[in-house]
Image (cartoon, helix red, strand yellow):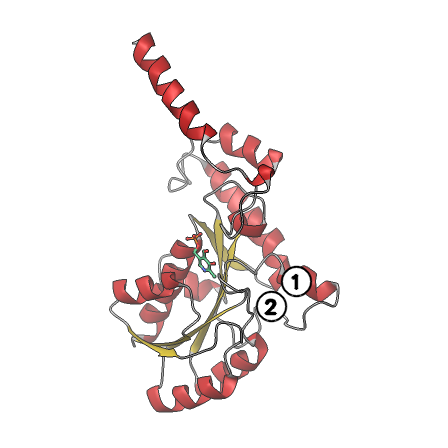
Amino acid sequence: MNNKYNALINELEQLYQITPKHIDGNIMGSMTTWPHPVGVKAFLKFIHVNGNDPFTFHVVAECEEKLIREVGGLFNAKVGLHTSGGTESNILAVFAAMKTTGSNVVIAPSTVHRSIDKACELMNCKLIKITTHPLKPVDPKMIKDHAVIHKPSLVVITAGTTETGIVDPVEEVAELAEKHGFLLHVDAAYGGLLIPFLRKHGLINTELKMTRGVSSITVDMHKNGMAPIPSSLLFLRDEELREKNML
Ligand SMILES: Cc1ncc(COP(=O)(O)O)c(C=O)c1O
């Protein structure tokens, strides 16, 4: 027993030694950050807790509520949930949109993260992509033209694309969402915890907020929030969007 245990620990140690570490400065483009010591402590302390059982572990519901209130404050968002990552948040956003509208046409720039492709495939949606240069935000006029032709139930844009950090025009597309009656999901998995601060320091104009035209926003805590992996937040426009869809 002891020998097997030691052998396993040794094997893990060897794997750890050959695993890149943020602290060595060798990691670029993995999208994640070295977790904050308090995050690591919290993670280990509550490692036995089943987040899907808020009745036994009511601390989970309380912590989630606090997280939504405090991080949501950056985006004027009051409703949301904690998920296991940007992929899950995006899948749930597409799921909620499909269930709410009963329609399955989704429009997104070609720069959208592949989790949106996965979500659409899972939900049997028709995903129409607008060809977009990877170094440019999507042109709102293209969204408008596609919306008129295809009448989508959902448009997905990105605030901080994975490869190049491009921020799509959130405010302009939100206006179109109101005018043309589609839901708008903003995938800010990567940029969500950078954009409010870049704006505060005058480095970017985009205002990333849960304004009237925006129906959901993904923000990853394990990308620029220094949370241990996995940790993401999905903010929703209102309680109805959450409850109706059992999120
Ligand atoms: C813009 C964007 N959305 C979604 C995701 C998926 O996030 P996760 O890896 O946490 O599932 C990523 C990951 O890099 C991303 O950059």
Report if residue 111 is visible in the image.
yes
Q: Quadrant of residue 100?
A: bottom left
Is label 2 in a helix, a strand or a loop? loop
Q: Position of residue 185 (x, y in %)?
A: 46, 69
Rendered residue at 43%/68% (across/down) = 112
Asked if the residues shown at circle 2 and circle 1 are in contact, with their CB atoms under 8 angstroms apart, the answer is yes
Q: Nearer the viewer, residue 23 or 5?
A: 23
Q: Position of residue 2 (x, y in %)?
A: 33, 8
Q: Which mark is residue 208?
A: 2
Q: Position of residue 127 (x, y in %)?
A: 32, 74
- Furthest residue to the top? 2
Q: Position of residue 76 (x, y in %)?
A: 61, 64
Q: According to the image, label 1 marks what residue?
A: 196
Query: Cα distance, mark 2 to mark 1?
Result: 7 Å
Tell me the quadrant of the picture where the N terminus can be found: top left
- Furthest residue to the right? 201
Tell me the quadrant of the picture where the C terminus can be found: bottom left
Q: Amino acid at mark 1?
A: Pro
Rendered residue at 40%/29% (across/down) = 15
